[in-house]
Image: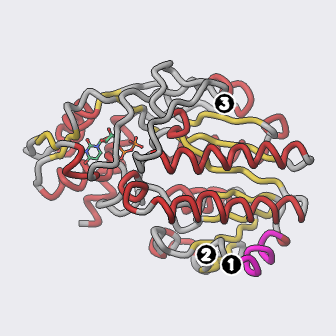
Amino acid sequence: MKYLVTGAAGFIGSHLCTELLKQGNQVWGLDDLSSGKLENIEHLKGNPNFEFVISCISNEAILQELIKKVDVIYHLAAIVGVKRYVEDPVKVIDVNLCYTSRLLELAWKHDKKVVLASTSEVYGKSDKVPFKEEDNRIYGSSTIDRWCYAISKTADEHLCFGYAKKGMPVVILRFFNAYGPRTNSWAYGGVVTRFINQALKGEPLTVHGNGTQTRCFTYIDDIIKGTIEAGRVREAEGKIFNLGNRNEISILDLANKILEISGKNGSIVFQCYEEFYGSSYEDIPRRSPDITAAEKILGYCPTISLEDGLKKTIEWYSKKL
Ligand code: UDP
């Protein structure tokens, strides 16, 4: 099969390209390197089945040429990272919604299948945990910049269903706190990346708020398995899938676990949200997925425990420092 992966040099994108190539597919990767890194795909250099193009998805001429070549588009290019949402909502809406809307239109025009990377963020601060794909979404005020990301991805999902009505095959994946080697830059990355880097550098781990907020962290290999099946399984078309795992952990417990596994004698400090994000932020107190749909239709089954995943990730970051 022939695939286009947008955001190919990013965290999930680079792992996805690697696995698609391993399985004997032909892959075109597209990335503007705004947050993705060439070193993430260094190991794919010279692979005759891989072609990498540096360009933003806003360049329609390049995007269209690539879309024409492939069978399936994995659309992962996006502005990600909570700190980025609060810093530049205009960019978030431009890339995640406006350019994505154009990409979907081109995919429809050329009759291609799209797998859209959405996010657990779309559930917002709903307290009906675990979140099921058809559940309501609960967002805060638009004066709080954090919600711009959820809104952009929600609108993308509506666009996907709109094109599905016109006959385009689409699959929507809501990722739940993916982590692993090659996660984004530590300053903008998710909490696992930040805590691991802090622990390895001997800095205190900065727990926001009181640390009782929870997440279900999902190791990248599990995420990739589900993502690949989503592009393959016909029954998945026209549907949304949560990709995550059921093991909920508080951020304070995560910090302690990372200190323990890294074997560093580090400490924890509590930091108020404003200090890190500014005033335009509110947290999501609990986040946990119902993964029944992915289990049934994609055969998805996360197997990597948080301990094992953290060990692998810590090992990878240790070599980077
Ligand atoms: N967080 C934290 N310390 C940090 C970075 C994040 O305590 O240095 C918290 C953050 O406030 C949130 C959780 O960890 O409650 C997960 O944050 P992340 O940025 O990974 O993404 P989110 O799950 O909120 O989308």
Say which amino acid is labelled 3. Ala
Q: Name the disc covering residue 294, or none.
A: 3
The residue that disc 1 covers is 59
Query: Residue at horizontal 47%, vertical 56%?
Result: 80
Where does the magenta region start and end?
59-67
Quadrant assignment for the N terminus? bottom right
Cα–Cα span, label 2 and label 1: 6 Å
Rate crowding at label 3 as few (under 14), some (14 to 19) or many (20 or more) other CA atoms within 10 Å.
many
Q: Are marks 1 and 3 in contact (CB under 8 Å)?
A: no
Q: Name the element at disc 3.
A: helix
Position of residue 315 relative to residue 3, above or below, is above
The residue that disc 2 covers is 56
Query: Residue at horizontal 34%, vertical 27%?
Result: 249
Of labels 3 and 2, earlier in sequence is 2
Query: Residue at horizontal 67%, vertical 58%?
Result: 75
Say which amino acid is labelled 1. Asn
| Residue 174 part of the magenta-drawn span | no
Q: Residue 308 vs residue 272: left or right?
A: right
Q: Position of residue 21 (x, y in %)?
A: 67, 63
Q: Residue 312 vs residue 79: left or right?
A: left
